[in-house]
Amino acid sequence: DGGITQSPKYLFRKEGQNVTLSCEQNLNHDAMYWYRQDPGQGLRLIYYSQIVNDFQKGDIAEGYSVSREKKESFPLTVTSAQKNPTAFYLCASSIKQGATHEQYFGPGTRLTVT
Amino acid sequence: AQSVTQPDIHITVSEGASLELRCNYSYGATPYLFWYVQSPGQGLQLLLKYFSGDTLVQGIKGFEAEFKRSQSSFNLRKPSVHWSDAAEYFCAVLKTSYDKVIFGPGTSLSVIP
């Protein structure tokens, strides 16, 4: 079955440590996205990538970094510079970049930093 | 700036009752609008979308939404709610200047037997 996988489902880290969240898709989609979800705030876009080796900052990119070395993979690193990293992180993909294309979401990773 | 508001943070309905979730947007032109659903601890799933044409849009799981330009609204409806509809519902609008989707804060739906 085609889809998006995110691992792990739950992640715990100590403050000051960088952590990388995995996102893999086998839908052959060109575009991939990372969102952060906080209670009562909906989803906010962190980074997006239209094609391999290219990515753009979203609305809240500070303290995060990404790479897109392969079409199917778009890992997100939460760095120690992110002031409030505890959140639910969602990865998504679409056939091509452009909001008119339906985005397919992974199950999410809940990150807790203490 | 384009934005989306969902006035109801939480709604509780009885199983079998009708449902309407409210969504208001601010945008200067014809908007592209979406409704997504999120089950607990899961990702989002697209229920329906409006780009143009008929203002009453049919979606999956028996949902529909009506675009009303005069009220800047895109309310989601279902005639008879099932217990499995308990979830978080997000309205969203396309931000054309960046070709990205802006999500509302969400409405949490509880269904009581």
Image (tube, coloured by chain):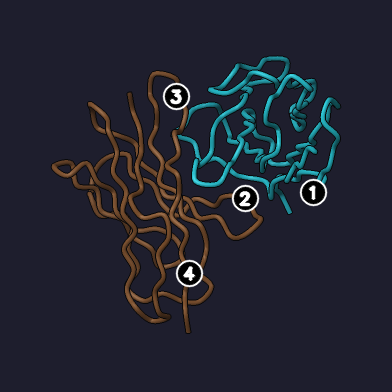
Chain colours: A cyan, B brown
- Residue at numbered disc 1: A10
Q: Earlier in the sequence, mark 4 or mark 2?
A: 2
Residue at the image point whose x is 66% and y is 38% from the top: A91
- Residue at numbered disc 2: B43
Residue B32 in the image, given as x and y percentages of width and height? 34, 36
Reply above or below: B54 against A24.
below
Disc 4 versus disc 2: nearer the observer? 4
Disc 1 versus disc 3: nearer the observer? 1
Q: Secondary structure at mark 3?
A: loop
Disc 2 versus disc 1: nearer the observer? 1
The Cα atoms of the two marked residues, 3 and 4, are separated by 33 Å
Q: Quadrant of the N terminus of chain B?
A: top left
Which chain letter matches label 1? A
- Residue at numbered disc 4: B110
Tag 4–tag 2 contact (CB < 8 Å)? no
Q: Residues within 10 Å of mark 1 (few under 14, many from 20)?
A: few
| Residue B99: mark in rendering | 3
Image-quadrant location for residue B24: top left
